[in-house]
Amino acid sequence: MKIALLGPSLKWRLSRFKLVFTSAFVAALTATLLAVFCLPANADFKLELEAAMEYDSNVATDAADNNAGLGDVARNLSLGLGYDFKINQHWNISSLYRVNDTQWYTYDEFDSQMHIGLVRMGFQQRKFSSDLTMIHAVGRVDGEDFLKLNRLSPGLGYLINTNWYIRAQGDVSQKTFALYEQRNGEAFAASVYLYRFIDRTRFYLTAQAQLKQENAKDDVYAYQASIFKLQLKRDWSVFNVKGSSRLKAHYEKRQYDGIRRVINAPREDDRWRLALKTHVQINDHWKVTSSLQGDWFDSNVEAADYNQERVQVGLAWEF
């Protein structure tokens, strides 16, 4: 149902829900961060810095000339601060702050910066585990505020045996766009993960299935999605050089709600992705990272129907 057709009472309830969700989320995230960082110093502190160069074949997608040389090169800088604390044999808390900064050589109007704060509380007893994760993210594009995201994710897991692990997770999100108010809304998702351990956590396969509903102020941007992911992770060693690789496959089917005037129908997307991410450990603190990724977007909206290739190589230091 469109927002314009909702009664005043329901509109007021939706506004109140957004206000309460945001206030409660920020309060809980702040309180947990303060609690975590005031804990004794016997916790595990992590620091990571990375500098990388990236090539993207389609930075500025344009329906008129998808193949007219819209690729570009960027430099990426990232900083990550992590803090893990084990409260007792069952409970643990972990937190992470990460900032990513991307500067493009030609299309500098797409320069971006993303700040992400995460707090996770976990519980484990024998084969059962549960956790609650809170995420707050702020994105800027071309020096201007672009997106704010709040997400709450409860999860449950069960270790079936030494080879199999199953996990269920829910996600409740709220998005706010600074310049595109019509895209503001909430999202709800439910996921099931299945892990097949071949050599413990050194070599395993993960399968994920997810159903997602994203609402928006303008139903042209609201959609339902079915998502399927596969990931093969392998740690390896060649001539005393150690590394780790992840091969990822992703398929997403999106069905939008609102009718697009250009095509006089709702938008429909099929999204495919294949990626290979690898890091090679130079020593205890330094590693070389690389990423190859291909995306294939099939859509009945011309501007969203294109292919994209990305390559990235970086150098990371961690403590």
Image: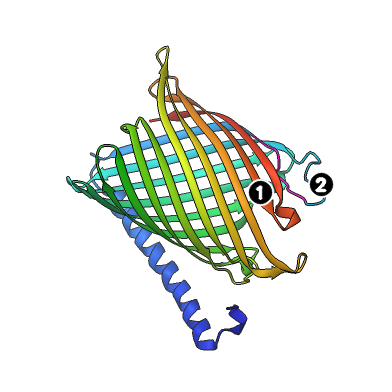
The quadrant of the rendering that contains the N terminus is bottom right
Front one among 159 and 311: 159
- Total label count? 2
Residue 19, placed above or below residue 211: below
Q: Classify residue 78 as left or right of residue 194.
A: right
Q: Classify residue 59 as left or right of residue 283.
A: right
Q: Give the extent of the magenta segment.
A: 55-62
Front one among 318 and 68: 68
Q: Residue at x 65, y 63 (%)?
A: 179
Measure the C-alpha gap from mark 2 to mark 1: 16 Å
Secondary structure beneath dot 1 equals strand
Quadrant assignment, res 101: top right
* Magenta segment includes 59: yes
Q: Residue at x 53, y 82 (%)?
A: 11
Q: Position of residue 154 (x, y in %)?
A: 35, 58
Q: Position of residue 112 (x, y in %)?
A: 62, 47
Secondary structure beneath dot 2 equals loop
Q: Classify residue 223 as left or right of residue 188.
A: right
Quadrant assignment, res 257: bottom right
User: Label for residue 2?
Assistant: none
Q: Amino acid at mark 2?
A: Asp
Type of secondary structure dominating the magenta stretch: loop
Judging by the rendered image, the residue that carries numbered circle 1 is 297
Judging by the rendered image, the residue that carries numbered circle 2 is 65
Specify few, some or many for label 2: CA neighbours under 10 Å numbering under 14, 14-19, or 20 or more: few
Name the front one of labels 2 and 1.
1
Residue 260, placed above or below residue 11: above
Q: Residue at x 70, y 53 (%)?
A: 304
Q: Amino acid at mark 1?
A: Phe
Front one among 298 and 130: 298
Q: Position of residue 131 (x, y in %)?
A: 30, 53
